[in-house]
Image (cartoon, rainbow, N blue to C red):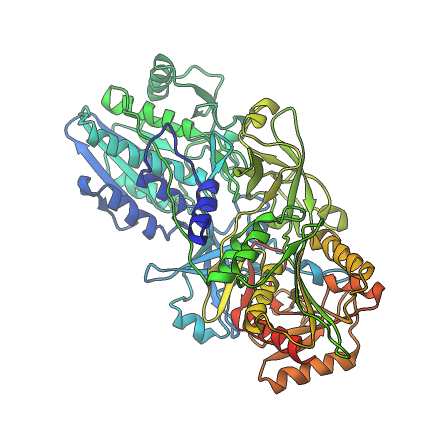
Amino acid sequence: MNRQALLIFLAVLGRAQPSFGQAYLPVEKLYEIPAVSGYEQLLSSEIRSQLQEFSPKTDNVGNVLVTVGSGAPHRLIVTPMDEPGYVVSGITTDGYLRLQRVPQAPPNSVFDLLHAAQPAWVMARDGKKVPGVFAGLSIHLQPLRVNAPKMSHPDDMYVDIGATSEGEVRAAGVDVLDAVTASRALYHVGATSWAADAIGDRFGCAALVDLLNQLRESHTKVHGTLTVAFVAQQLTGGRGLERLLNEVSANEAIYVGRLAPPGNATANASLARRPGDGILMGVSDPAASLGGLSAELKKLADENRLPIAVTLSSPPPIASYSKASPLPERFALLDIATILPRTPAETMSPSDSWRLEELLFRYVGGAAAPVGQSGQRSSGKTGPELLGELTETYGVSGHEELVRLAVQRHLPEWAKTETDAAGNLVLHLGGAHGNRPSLAFVAHMDEIGYQVRMIEPDGRLLVDVLGGGFTQYFLGHPVLIHSTQGGHHQITGGVLELPPGSEQPGFEWPHGPRALEEPAHVHVGARAAEETQKLGIRAGDWVTIPKEYRPLLGKRATARSFDDRVGCAALIEAVGALGADLPDREVTFVWSTEEEVGLKGAGAVAERMAKEGRTPDFVFAIDTFVSSDSPLESKRFADAEIGKGFVIRAVDNSNITPREYVDRVVTLAHENNIAVQYGVTGGGNDGAVFQRYGSVDIPLGWPLRYSHSPGEVIDTRDVDALAKIIAVLAKKW
């Protein structure tokens, strides 16, 4: 399978899948367009584009209105467009963005924290989405640190777009007041659900766009006048809704959006229900008899066997400095259930959205809506051919098969590799070396992730952590469950659940070493173990966080698993530069397994080479230099700047390199015009397990921001420097 086909295969499996055999409809795109309150322009533009045959109008607040039919009664259906997010509040002299929330109150206790170290979009004034990363702490630099930032408030938040100065930020088109959100995609969860950031803020837009197009395509006549409105700034005081109430004189109105219990406008009443349960109707007193429009809608749903449940809710809030505009007397609230509301893993069932759409179609047209729902898109990915593929290939500790295949595809045809019992990929070059030292270069193929321990009776997966990382970077986000069925790699979407109590005000994320080792639960849209098993999921399957290689400004890039796919790429490039003929030298290249769970693959190689009498004199472990080049870290420790060259890990938790060898590497780098740095960092390296057999460990790496997170950042010039020094060392050490 070529690279493009492989990436399309992986991308499609992780995204929303076809429903009922239907083709993809553009309405799905609405779930992926950010729309921070007051900055809904990209979304409103897409809505107008998809409804252009209706000649939609936009008022001075940003509301988008479509009116069809004429005469009485005048009915209004309204849904909000906006979502919580941030705006750029300042730009630092060294090129980072400072942020302020919009609206200023967080929607839940973990909202800010779940953005830490995640890929970001900055919505520039020209409509361009500029990629970036929310800064995050690097786990290797935190042991014994005093008063580290909690990353749970905008005071601790920065966005990194790869700039080195305020001028570079502005030259990229980014400025103060530009909106900022987490980047997002629509993911398929199990067989019946979808997950996306802000999906609970966006289902109404998708349902109403589809409703209008179904009315047009089916030539259905509406009785009287119907206005469908997509309102702006609902989260910032209901400004769009209040403007709408003063420009549209409707006899009755339906609000489609999140239900809010009285006294807590940020909560989500749908938590009492689960995705797939049907439509939710909000009322001020569920115990009282329904009347008016709500009773009529409930009757219409029951008559057409559309599941609907009545739940407690307050009207959509309108905060006004004068008396707020009244809602029509005939007014109803409709919603659908989600879980993990206002997190990156918020999950809904599209069947609930279609039921809601069916109810609205019968309400305005008196007939059943024609079937035709959202389906799949397929898209390739671009980026540097080698590093792009390696970082976008999945392989957690103990499951590195896909990565090993990717490495083999990029090695020269003459490179005759072997795969040992531990799964390591090994390449021997040269032969008899006389008095010249033998060398080994080792980079690990695995990444951090999870493994399924068991399927719970309720259908959830109990998963164990593979490798170390801050749990707040992963819990509450979408995941991919990797299985093997009939010899084929299968991917099923899911979401990692949040810690208990996270929905409570004042929640504090669990900290300390044990927090990194606690098992977690994955929701796959099932309600029983048998349903999960039908998805092909079994104990022992592995779980990853979705990832994508994305260029930033200049030579910088972001992705998850640069640790250690950069090392793997550097070894491949060095092998190609060396060629097959390496006289008077014995050099071994190793792409190792299970480094993140205890250097297991490298340990197996070191032991085998010792038994064969081939212990290398020097081993160069090629791995990350976890850098404090970040606004959240202390520059006292691990201070190596990205873009300034490869790094010698002179001291880390597993090794202290003799200074004479540090100086020798520096000298060779200078002689060959290769940018070099050296310093002290945290973590261990694969070379440490060779020391017991007599090897000298000289670990090399590249500076990395936000280690072990979904938003790692590198400068590709450092990768080039690393590949060059490996080739020099292989020839001249």
How far across and down, in percent of the image, does residue 606 sit?
Answer: 77, 60
Front-lying residue, 39 or 59: 39
Front-lying residue, 502 or 194: 194
Decide: is 663 above or below 442: below
Decide: is 615 above or below 514: below
Q: Residue at x 32, y 62 (%)?
A: 126
Q: Residue at x 42, y 52 (%)?
A: 4
Front-lying residue, 51 or 436: 436
Front-lying residue, 610 or 200: 610
How far across and down, in percent of the image, does residue 240 sit?
Answer: 33, 44
> Which quadrant of the structure image shows residue 247?
top left
From the viewer's perspective, tell me whether residue 227 is left or right of residue 118.
Answer: left
Number of numbered discs on residues: 0
Outermost residue, top direction?
A: 303
Q: Quadrant of the C terminus?
A: bottom right
Does residue 136 appear in the picture of this structure? no
How far across and down, in percent of the image, does residue 152 sit?
Answer: 61, 53
Decide: is 228 above or below 416: above
Does residue 717 appear in the picture of this structure? yes
Outermost residue, left direction?
A: 71
From the viewer's perspective, tell me whether residue 209 is left or right of residue 573.
Answer: left
Outermost residue, front direction?
A: 432
From the viewer's perspective, tell me whether residue 318 is left or right of residue 275.
Answer: left
How far across and down, in percent of the image, does residue 91 sit?
Answer: 48, 69
